[in-house]
Amino acid sequence: MPDLLLELFSEEIPARMQAKAADDLRRMVTDKLVAEGLVYEGAKAFATPRRLALTVHGIPARQSDLKTERRGPKLGAADAAVQGFLRATGLKSLDEATIQRDPKGDFYVALIEKPGRDAIDVLAEILPVIIRTFPWPKSMRWGERSAKPGSLSWVRPLHSIIATFGLETEQPDVVKFSVDGIEAGQTTCGHRFMAPAAISVRRFGDYEAKLKAAKVVLDAQARRDIILADANELAFAQGFELVEDQVLADEVAGLVEWPVALMGSFEKEYLSIPDEVIRATIRNNQKCFVVRDPKTGQLTNKFILTANIEASDGGKAIVAGNERVIRARLSDAKFFYETDLKTKLEARLPKFDGIVFHEKLGTQAERIQRIAELAAQIAPMVGADTEKAKRAAHLAKADLLTEVVGEFPELQGLMGKYYALAQGEDAAVAAASEEHYKPQGPTDRVPTDPVSVAVSLADKIDTLVGFWAIDEKPTGSKDPYALRRAALGVIRLVVENKHRIHLEKIVLKAIDGLAPLDDNGSRWIWGYDPNSPLSQKQRDRGVVESLQSLVSNDAALISQLLSFFADRLKVQLREQGARHDLVDAVFALGGQDDLLMVVRRVEALGKFLDTDDGKNLLAGTKRASNILSIEEKKDKRAFDGAPDAGLYKLPEEKALAKAIGQARGEASAAVAKEDFAGAMGAMAKLRPAVDAFFDKVKVNDDEPRVRENRLRLLNEIRAATRAVADFSKIEG
């Protein structure tokens, strides 16, 4: 079957847009083909700085003929209905229609035959529409036509279009169409400098080979592999090793069509700057890789750049130009770093008084104070020194006001660590400056130092409580304050460090920090000073009153936050292979704010339900719950309270009652010792008695007192199993 080759050749496409643009082109073309009944075999899109390309192979040469039936009016219908039916179907008279018998009457039916079109004609129709409606994040118009209505808008000026269609064994045809005066053809250009002449191509294999001969590597992944391989080889030849950067490699692959690795250098004096600052300077400003000495693990005064040309001088001029820029940028970075060292972190803190964190949550200074107080309260729970935790929280945000972080925001926290060490702070205090932001994602490292853990928990929980209090919760599609990430961070900090923490207590302390209780038991807003300009603005906007009302219901706010943590924990455990319904079953018990214990319960419950005893007990428990739910709804009452042993008629009732009493006692004792596996084992002993009860006992006995007693006994099963989980929440 025929193949399509499409290329859109333009001025330089921004690297950050190329991958999505290639994917959009593939999706839009293939979706249109399928919608037109042209089901293809495969498609692949490519992007370079100057072109988007697409190959779709295995496209049918022609659409299939379509035959459809259209039902019309009843026999004897009004003439207006008949004429409308004839116009809609293209029939000349009712003689061309058939009659279909139906229980509701006889109807006219038209058989409409629509012949298929050649695929090349369909392509000529859909491709211009796709080009005109292409979803670039930003686009432009150019030239004399740009002022005309309906002129083409594209990311950069579009120069030419290749569109060929045909069998691999034959000369393909050009898909005839034009967009804004640009006629589709089969001509493109190679590398801008090394092979700028026009190239005539026929099909994809021919196209890719001729581009490579014209110094263009079409595939972005291939360019990326060349960049990393050549850079590694160049570094190795000098006795160094490349500091690989996958994100940078992807970006550089979008900047060049013919990658050429070159090595440059800078003065050794700049190595006095922290390695991360050197790397950020060289990476951000010149898109170059840094190199380290494998013997020391430290950066060397070398860098590797990727040129887009095989220069006649071997790249000397290109290297020299990059060296000049990097030297100037490193000089600036060195000045910023040395200037920052002259001012202690603590001396920067007063500036936070004038920086608003959020108009409803006060200044950064107020927030830092809240975090410090909360970190001091969390410290004993995680084995941290209270004073160190408080000191670390006070200094953790100070580097936000430094020159280096102002230039490279991605270094916040890390620079705080360097500055804290330079001014003689304790190592744990300094480390917390960097680590309190962690973990920032599912693959990010989790801090283990107790001081860092205390400050990180305080920071994240203060954020969650604050934005919950002002009703800025995440929605299904939006989470502008990254509250889901903060909650997952709290979960990982607690679970992976195996800390026993009751979240409810910490959340309540965070609420106290945001809106403390006064002598009368009423909450007032932390840091509110009626004489300060900021607080007056808060008063004018009703911020103080709204916060007071939002945090006045502590129980509701805590309940909402714990439910949010439960949802995040379900996501976390599901990614690890656990069942979300088991998390629901544990949280349904109420008061489950010890995340580590929740995880251990879920793990034990999952293992138990994988056994035959677990599966059968679950089935029996759910049967008991279902019967109770039906009867409670019917009688409009709950069957709680202890059963009357004197009303037991059958030995199976007595055996079940005895088994429940024994299992409940053993399970409760095991749970008290946090032996959840033992608690499950105790519950497993219920299985024979439950099976025998349902096999021999009629629950809805004709005698009302016996029926009620047996329903109470079923309720005892439900109550006993709740020692470990709410089995009614478990699926299956």
Image (spheres, rainbow, N blue to C red):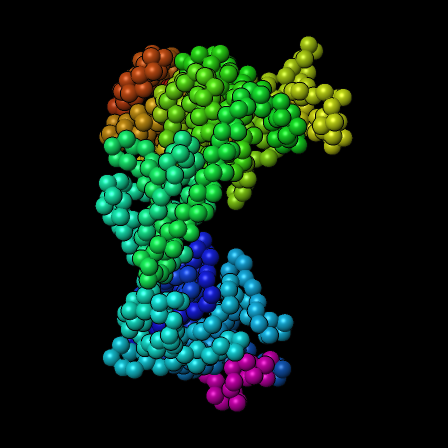
Predominant SS of the magenta segment: helix
Left or right: where 680 falls relative to 475: left
Left or right: where 602 falls relative to 479: left
Above or below: residue 542 compared with residue 521: below
Residue 472 in the image, given as x and y percentages of width and height: 59, 35
The foreground one among 151 and 662 is: 151
The foreground one among 527 and 297 is: 297
Residue 56 in the image, given as x and y percentages of width and height: 34, 69
Question: Residue 93: within the magenta?
Answer: yes
Residue 134 in the image, given as x and y percentages of width and height: 50, 64
Above or below: residue 445 compared with residue 346: below
**Residue at left 32%, top 33%?**
298
The foreground one among 229 and 673 is: 229
- The stretch of residues the image draws in magenta is 81-98
**Residue at left 47%, top 34%?**
334
Residue 384 in the image, given as x and y percentages of width and height: 42, 14
Q: Which residue in the rendered view is the most extreme toward the top?
A: 519
Picture quarter containing residue 607?
Answer: top left
Picture quarter containing residue 650?
Answer: top left
